[in-house]
Amino acid sequence: MEIKNKQQGIKVVADVLDIVGGKWRGQILAHLCDDPKRFNELKTVLNHITSSTLTKELRYLEDIKMVERKIIQQTPIIVEYRLTNHGMSIKDLIKHIVEWGLKHREIVFKKD
Amino acid sequence: MEIKNKQQGIKVVADVLDIVGGKWRGQILAHLCDDPKRFNELKTVLNHITSSTLTKELRYLEDIKMVERKIIQQTPIIVEYRLTNHGMSIKDLIKHIVEWGLKHREIVFKKD
DNA sequence: TATACAGGTAGTTTTCAGGATACTTAGGTA
DNA sequence: TACCTAAGTATCCTGAAAACTACCTGTATA
């Protein structure tokens, strides 16, 4: 797991930020770190996200195998989203992001 | 440096990604991790970025005190961009991002 | 005189993630 | 027969990020 050259390392930064970035994906992954959540649970904790946006983001995260969708046959039928094994590995990264953010509040809170 | 509650932690994720995210900022910071770079050096390594976009991104990073701009009086005059002390602290985070990205290539490279 | 390099600025246009709004499917319940 | 909840879909629209194009300033070199 060696960084072959600087340029490659930096491309990876851009690619990872493409996955985790955007307005919602980081937050969705962070929420799923704790435990699986249903569609409407996510919709509630992600204040102001619309159904269509949440659906799109979840489908994307499914496509890249970060999240899996599980239909639970009960009545009414409910759908649960949880991190895959790959997805689990993002927990540490999110922890690092939170740590950096809390340590540098003056930057993080100044930004807007 | 304690996470008071889940919701706060997750807001921080979103805020940090706001700073580091976007198409260019992560890459710019990653390039500046190694050593200071001049405007046109950055423009070269960041393939396809335009002058105006690079200027905007650098001004933003200056505003939030991640990067500092140093004019070097020689001829022709050159301008050097380097991480501030705050900025330095992002090195570790970028290292973690690269590590995760390389370990999960199948996700990172599938995404598009 | 003019051409090149370094580091930009100004103004306009394009693109597309995310938002707004309304509708859908399917079983259960009064 | 109508309505409720859960989990979406379908369309169209908007705003902001980034791109495109052109121009500017100062110094030096031919």
Image: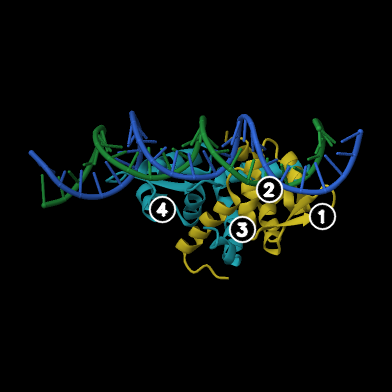
Chain colours: A yellow, B cyan, C blue, D green
Image spot of residue B91 (x, y percent): 57, 54
Say which of A4 and B11 sits in front: B11
Left or right for C18, reference B76: right
Q: Nearer the viewer, mark 2 or mark 4?
A: 2
Percent x, y of residue A71: 76, 55
- Camera-near label (4 vs 3) is 3
Q: Which residue is mark 1?
A: A73
Front tag of 3 and 2: 3
Element class at badge 2: helix
Q: CA distance from mark 2 to mark 4?
A: 30 Å
Q: CA distance from mark 3 to mark 2?
A: 15 Å
Task: Return the mark for residue A28.
Answer: 2
| Residue at left offset 53%, top offset 63% | B109
Q: Which residue is mark 3?
A: A63
Numbered label attached to residue B46: 4
Marks 2 and 1, Cα distance to the nearest angstrom? 24 Å
Report the chain holding disc 3.
A
Name the amino acid type tagged 4: Leu
| Residue B3 makes an appearance in the image | no
Label 1 and label 4: CA atoms lie apart by 50 Å
Question: In the figure, residue C7 lies in which quadrant?
Answer: top left
Residue plotted at (68% across, 59% down): A87
Instruction: Report whether mark 4 lies on the same chain as mark 3.
Output: no
Q: Are marks 3 and 1 on the same chain?
A: yes
What subunit carries mark 1? A
Q: Are marks 2 and 1 in contact (CB under 8 Å)?
A: no
The kind of secondary structure element at disc 3 is helix
Q: Amino acid at mark 1?
A: Gln
Badge 1 density bin: few <14, some 14–19, many ≥20, Cα 10 Å? few
